[in-house]
């Protein structure tokens, strides 16, 4: 018999459970709770009702009466349940040892030897809600948990068991080394959170961490978290000694994983990345990640301005809306499922992915090839083009006088050149701040200026970057319903569903009545807020204005931001851009959107902080800190080109500001 089980309002099994749900609701008055399984099924029925999820043809009156009846029956059942029934339930559901059950146990618990683990969490919720701890002593529960080695994490989902069984929970937590991962989970991006026993001292937890690092089955992902450190961890101090121990253990495990004898088993996913120097080969190449550094163009071109501009249009450097494309955009680069399966990372983690890594590798290779060909054909370096921008070009085009930008000689060791680039990045940052505030760059004032944070760098433009208003619940709800693969309105039936609601609407002729009753409240929300329309026959559709608004929301959902002054990679004053700006202005007035006037958009600031600093993200490259604080570093060409790319990004952003401001 398939029992009713509530997972979440967006779970796709809901429709398949409606027949039994309807049957039980209609028979609620005569229903008998003969055992724990019956009671826990009723508990799940009440969860459906509390979310207003039930078959459409059941009246509100019946639902209200059923809710009252089942709550009374459930209360009475847990008042009368015996201590032995509770212990039996722990044994046969959590231990699942396959021992034959006697007839009385089957009758009182509803379990037989074929029962699965459907209601484990529900039982623990009821244990708390109906205060079953008053019937079960600490010795009782200790005996059953130890005898059948029931995992401790079941009892750390809330504070209840720690409060009423503190000594036992601490003992069981420290008993198994693997439990240290539960603490680390609290500082990862996982939605699962555990209550860690507060009677464990920091010294005890430090020793527990040391024990985990040496643990035979320690997870490499968790060891990497310890190695990099975790910002904000309260239960222990992850000091340099712990980090070093974790690093050595990581190296040991990685060497084993990637040893020659395992090489054939660990090839992973291969993805070709190509940078071509001849257009003919580039055009015919099949790689998803490819770029062109056209040597025929370089042989004919000697304008430094044009050579600078050439980099702007590297494939994958900027989006069509002129946002730096090297940033991580999780909504389009990774699905919810892939993010769930992508390993363990902290809450202060810059979200990377297979796609993110490849597009950044492509840009590093593109700059390396471009640097090589510039030197080979024109005896120039990218550094020469940067100097040109901050000297001749800015002065001639915009009457802006920058302080000198001086690079080290190319004969210097690569780490010395990289350190110089880091210093220049800070100088450019400070100079732009002075220019924005003073309309000039005064050398004496520059000497007293501290390096400003990236997110504080202002703009010459009004309404430059457009964002969703995070304090407006309506905006956030609209975007989730329209585009998320976790939206409640993307699955109507096996044959009528989509990856998101917009796809479902575009690909099908759908009526409001096609949706289940519990889903219609979300459809009404979109209708009430003018996101979609409904005709006299009940069919859903969108007007041209609504499509434009959906398009604006979609771009913000995908990239986190919209550039107010761009459409399709070129600053323009065409009608489409004007129409988009008018719609954005209306949405700002309605409080759906906000704007910021900054040099970099928020996703760009996060990416640059990931590259340069180590204060915001646990997994940051932290190149500015690495090269500015006297660290002993190996020669690393990638570090050098990352900072070089950052300086080119500054040029592109500053040039854009000066051009648009002039207009």
Image (tube, rainbow, N blue to C red):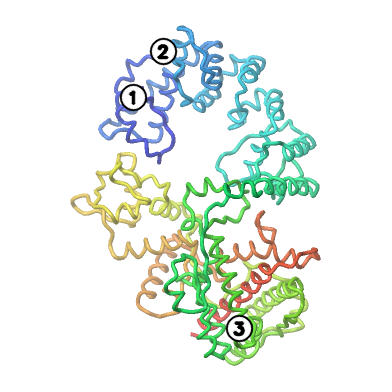
First in sequence: mark 3 vs mark 1:
1
Residue under label 1: 65
Would residue 327 be seen by someone viewing this image from the given angle? yes
Q: Is residue 216 above or below residue 44?
A: below
The residue furthest bottom is: 396
The image shows residue 602 at horizontal and vertical percentages of: 56, 64
Mark in the foreground, 3 or 1: 3
Mark 2 element type: loop
The image shows residue 629 at horizontal and vertical percentages of: 79, 65
Mark 1 element type: helix
Front residue of this view, candidates 531 and 44: 44
Q: Are marks 3 and 1 in contact (CB under 8 Å)?
A: no
Residue under label 2: 34
Q: Are marks 2 and 1 in contact (CB under 8 Å)?
A: no
| Quadrant housing the N terminus | top left
Q: Residues within 10 Å of mark 2 (few under 14, many from 20)?
A: few
In this picture, residue 20 sits left or right of residue 584: left
The image shows residue 84 at horizontal and vertical percentages of: 55, 10
Q: Residues within 10 Å of mark 1 (few under 14, many from 20)?
A: few
Q: Is residue 634 above or below residue 219?
A: below
First in sequence: mark 3 vs mark 2:
2
Mark in the foreground, 2 or 1: 2
In this picture, residue 579 sits left or right of residue 207: left
Q: What is the CA distance from the residue labelled 2 to the residue labelled 1?
A: 21 Å
Mark 3 element type: helix
| Mark linked to residue 374 | 3
Front residue of this view, candidates 657 and 52: 657
């Amino acid at each position: 018999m398939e029992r009713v089980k509530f997972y979440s309002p967006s779970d796709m099994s809901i429709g398949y459970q409606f027949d039994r749900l309807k049957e039980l609701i209609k028979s609620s008055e005569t229903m008998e709770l003969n055992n724990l399984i019956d009671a826990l099924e009723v508990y799940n029925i009440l969860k459906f009702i509390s979310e207003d999820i039930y078959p459409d043809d059941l009246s509100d009156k019946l639902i209200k009466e059923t809710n009252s009846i089942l709550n009374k029956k459930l209360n009475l059942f847990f008042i009368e349940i015996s201590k032995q029934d509770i212990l039996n339930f722990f044994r046969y559901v959590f231990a699942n040892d396959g021992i034959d059950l006697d007839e009385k146990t089957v009758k009182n618990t509803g379990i037989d030897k074929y029962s699965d683990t459907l209601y484990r969490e529900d039982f623990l919720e009821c244990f708390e809600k109906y205060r079953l701890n008053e019937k079960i002593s600490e010795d009782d529960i200790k005996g059953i948990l130890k005898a059948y080695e029931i995992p401790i994490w079941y009892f750390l989902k809330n504070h209840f068991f720690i409060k009423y069984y503190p000594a036992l929970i601490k003992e069981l937590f420290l008993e198994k080394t693997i439990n240290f991962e539960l603490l680390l989970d609290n500082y990862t991006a996982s939605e699962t959170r555990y209550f860690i026993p507060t009677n464990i001292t920091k010294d005890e937890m430090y020793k527990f961490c040391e024990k985990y690092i040496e643990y035979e089955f320690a997870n490499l992902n968790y060891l990497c978290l310890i190695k990099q450190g975790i910002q904000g961890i309260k239960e222990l101090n992850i000091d340099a000694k712990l980090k070093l121990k974790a690093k050595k253990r990581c190296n040991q495990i990685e060497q084993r994983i990637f040893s020659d004898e395992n090489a054939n088993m660990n090839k992973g996913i291969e993805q070709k990345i190509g940078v071509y120097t001849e257009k003919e080969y580039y055009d015919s190449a099949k790689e998803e990640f490819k770029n062109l550094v056209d040597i025929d163009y370089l042989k004919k071109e000697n304008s430094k301005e044009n050579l600078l501009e050439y980099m702007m249009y590297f494939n994958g450097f900027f989006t069509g809306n002129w946002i730096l494309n090297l940033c991580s955009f999780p909504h389009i680069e990774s699905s919810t499922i892939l993010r769930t399966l992508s390993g363990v990372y902290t809450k202060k983690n810059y979200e990377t992915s297979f796609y993110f890594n490849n597009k950044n590798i492509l840009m590093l290779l593109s700059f390396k090839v471009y640097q090589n060909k510039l030197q080979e054909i024109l005896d120039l370096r990218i550094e020469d083009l940067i100097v040109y921008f901050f000297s001749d070009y800015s002065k001639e085009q915009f009457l802006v006088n920058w302080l000198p930008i001086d690079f080290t000689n190319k004969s210097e060791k690569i780490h010395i050149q990289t350190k110089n680039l880091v210093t220049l990045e800070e100088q450019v940052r400070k100079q732009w701040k002075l220019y924005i505030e003073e309309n000039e760059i005064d050398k004496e004032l520059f000497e007293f200026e501290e390096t400003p944070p990236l997110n504080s760098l202002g703009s010459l433009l009004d309404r430059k970057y457009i964002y969703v208003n995070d304090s407006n619940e309506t905006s956030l709800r609209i975007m989730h319903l329209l585009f998320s693969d976790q939206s409640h309105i993307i699955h109507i039936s096996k044959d009528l569903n989509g990856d998101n609601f917009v796809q479902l609407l575009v690909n099908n002729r759908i009526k409001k009545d096609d949706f289940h009753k519990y889903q219609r409240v979300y459809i009404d929300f979109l209708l009430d807020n003018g996101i979609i329309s409904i005709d006299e026959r009940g069919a859903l559709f969108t007007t041209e204005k609504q499509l434009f608004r959906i398009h604006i929301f979609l771009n913000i959902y995908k990239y986190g931001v919209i550039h107010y002054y761009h459409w399709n990679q070129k600053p323009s004053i065409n009608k489409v851009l004007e129409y988009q700006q008018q719609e954005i202005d209306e949405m700002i007035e309605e409080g759906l959107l906000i704007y910021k006037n900054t040099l970099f958009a928020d996703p760009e600031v996060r990416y640059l902080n990931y590259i340069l600093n180590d204060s915001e993200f646990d997994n940051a490259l932290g190149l500015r800190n690495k090269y500015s604080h006297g660290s002993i570093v190996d020669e690393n060409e990638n570090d050098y080109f990352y900072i070089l790319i950052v300086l080119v990004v500054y040029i592109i952003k500053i040039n854009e500001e000066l051009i648009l401001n002039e207009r």
